[in-house]
Image: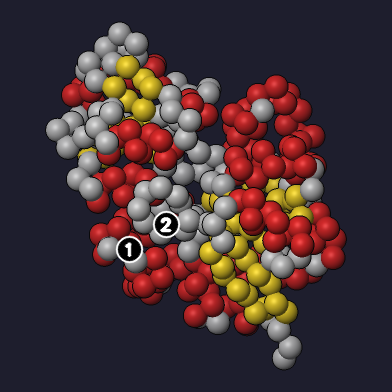
Amino acid sequence: MSLVNLNVMYGHLEGAGHDFARDPTGYLSIEAGIFRKHGLEVSWQHVQGTEERYRRLADGTAHISLVVGRASLQHFLSSKTTQIIGCAMNTCPYYLVAAPTITKLADLKNKAVACREGPLRNTPIAETFDKLTRLRVGADLSLQLPQGDQDAFNMLVNGKVDGAFLPRPFAFIAEEQGFKRITEWPEVVDDPLPITIETTRKLLSEREKDLATFLTAHSEGIRHFKSHRAEAIGILEKQFGHSSSLAQKTFTDYIACMDETLKVDFRQFDKLLSQIAPEMAPSAQQVASEWIMSGALRVA
């Protein structure tokens, strides 16, 4: 049987000292022969830098990019050339991680906490602190708003703040360095659509059938990854150099958030749009219809 070639690109989380891929499942799918079973010869490539990935999509040397939703939405709003064909993770709430001496929320009194500004929009962070600890943001603790998640991570590990709201990969790496997750903090700070599956409108029009086959195979691959713990952890250790503890944490608390339906949850898209372009929030339905491939959106 002749196999159809598809080149899939992903990036590493930058700045934390580890090769952490947002979607590592393709490697196990290749090893297990899942893509080949569906008639595909898939290359799962690390390509760092969103602009380089867009260049390769544009010139046709790659066909699919796995990218954080805020980057893909920003690019779409400025270019209108890309299309989301699915979403491998709709939501993955941030963890609150603190210095080793902080063991509970109340210990953050008169301390500083960092969080990227975007996730705080429409998030009741001050109300949650007040409800759980009677700590008032601005009076009993300070909230610092760095530009990015990496900046929040750096502020924490460099001792500039006592706690930070971090995406789970950054949180896991901070824990590897001795910082502590505050487990009493609820899942109210989020990063909507952390793994979108993106192509160009041109590629979608030319290879719609092949891309649909990829989605079917990738969905099976995510289910396979989730149900084969030992093999999945082996991929994380071998391919990305994770320690045993980091690989296990990634499998248990990150891979579990992956959505094998590959549908975009409209509620999460709506949250993302309100973060990226709040002035366009009233037009969310229209933006979604332009950005997300027909059939890839889950409304209810």
Task: Give the quadrant of the N terminus.
Answer: bottom right
- Residue sitting at 79 percent across and 43 percent down? 80
The scheme the figure's colours follow is secondary structure
Look at the image and tell me whether residue 115 can be seen: yes
Q: How many marks?
A: 2
Amino acid type indicated by mark 1: His
Residue 276 location in percent, x, y?
62, 31
Q: Residue furthest top?
A: 139
Q: Residue at x 41, y 53 (%)?
A: 254
Would residue 267 be visible to someone looking at this image?
no
Label 2 amino acid?
Answer: Phe
Image coordinates of residue 176 in percent, x first then y, are: 25, 51
Quadrant of the frame with the C terminus: top right
Q: Position of residue 289 (x, y in %)?
A: 79, 41
C-alpha gap between disc 1 and disc 2: 8 Å
Q: Quadrant of residue 206?
A: bottom right
Residue that badge 2 annotates = 20
Circle 2: element type? loop
Nearer to me, 204 or 215: 204
Which disc is residue 51 wearing?
A: none
Numbered disc 1: secondary structure: loop
Give coordinates of residue 114: x percent, y percent: 36, 28
Q: Within the image, what quadrant is residue 74 found in?
A: top right
**N-terminal label among 1 and 2:** 2
Residue that badge 1 annotates:
242
**Is disc 1 in contact with disc 2, using a CB cutoff of under 8 Å?**
yes
Q: Is residue 230 left or right of residue 292?
A: left
Residue at (54, 46) in percent of width and height: 194
